[in-house]
Image (spheres, rainbow, N blue to C red):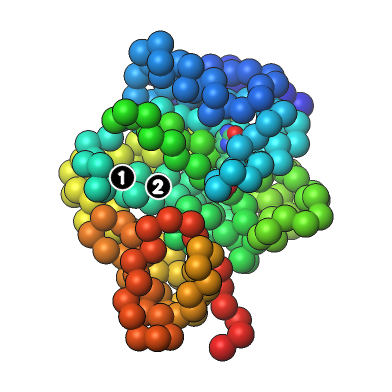
Amino acid sequence: MPLDIARIRAHRPETEIHYLGTVGSTMTEAARLLAGGATHGTVVIADQQTAGIGRLGRSWVSEPETGIYASILLRLALSAANLPIATLVLGLATAEAIHKATHVACDLRWPNDVLINEGKAAGILTQLVDTSIIAGIGINVNQTSFPAGLRTRATSLRLESGGRLQSREAVFVALLDSLDGFCSTLETQGPDGILRAFTSSSSYVVNRRVIVEEGGVKGWTAGLDKNGFLLVRSDAGRLERIASGGIRPDYSA
Ligand code: BTN
């Protein structure tokens, strides 16, 4: 079934929402709107993407009328050095929204994988355009299977809630509300408030055995630095600051 966009608009009358049945990628559409002067909070959401974009040049499988495929424009009070904090804000908001709407608890894997039982339930992509951020959020809501060969095992809210069909509208409205909440936390408490929230919501920030995807360094996670980058104490004893890419659990030790 297509999204009940009227229900979403009724919950969020103040939000500018652009709804599309099918689009190549909501990221491209959001970039077009941004170039035309769209403001903070503007949303592009689609029922289907034919060319969904993932991180690091990967694609994002976007089965019709099953997941949430959205891009949201953000203008946050962050310096260039602090931009990784925006990614953490989005992960926190997505995890909180999923929990509120479905009662399924999520873990966060730096920088922006939203996991349930170690399966990836949502992914976040941030693109910086001048001082604005285009935040792309894909949430696996009602998928019951995924293509073979994905790098990380994928899961969905439906699979993690005993097969119960979940409301995409409820999850998306909760996402917009949670995003407002964490943007306010950023405004009132600054980056430290977000760093604290992420550290307490993620099992990956401290004392987790990981492999760094770029370069393959192995070690133990050692917290976030003040700009939101992950620190890893490598097996060679060096404190590495992970500036790009991601991490995977290392079960070999
Ligand atoms: C990741 O690789 O983990 C990030 C995936 C981000 C996917 C979302 S779906 C909505 C938006 N439009 C896209 O083309 N990509 C993002």
Give the image location of residue 155, x and y in percent. 69, 55
Say which mark, if any, is on residue 11: none
Identity of the amino acid at label 1?
Leu
Q: Vertically, is 139 above or below 203?
A: above
Which of the two marks, 2 or 1, is nearer to us in this view? 1
Residue type at numbered disc 2: Thr
- On screen, residue 1 above or below 174: above
Mark 2 Cα shell of 10 Å, populated few (<14), some (14-19), many (≥20): many
Image-based side of 196 in relation to 125, left or right? left
The numbered disc on residue 83 is 1
The one of 239 and 117 positioned closer to us in this rendering: 239
Q: What crowding class fits label 1: few (fewer than 14 Cα within 10 Å), some (14-19), or many (20 or more)?
A: many
The structure residue drawn at horizontal position 53% and vertical position 55%, both measured from the top left corner, is 113
Q: Quadrant of the C terminus?
A: bottom right
Q: Residue furthest top?
A: 36
Residue 159 falls in which quadrant of the image? bottom right
The residue lying furthest to the bottom in this view is 253
Q: Nearer the viewer, residue 22 or 167?
A: 22
Q: Mark 2 = which residue?
A: 87
Residue 136 against residue 233 in the figure, above or below: above
Q: Residue at x 66, y 50 (%)?
A: 157
In the depicted view, which residue is nearer to us: 164 or 138?
Answer: 138
Q: Residue at x 41, y 41 (%)?
A: 178
Q: Are marks 2 and 1 in contact (CB under 8 Å)?
A: yes
Q: Is residue 234 left or right of residue 17?
A: left
Q: Position of residue 89 (x, y in %)?
A: 37, 47
Tell me the quadrant of ligand 1: top right
Q: Position of residue 130 (x, y in %)?
A: 32, 28
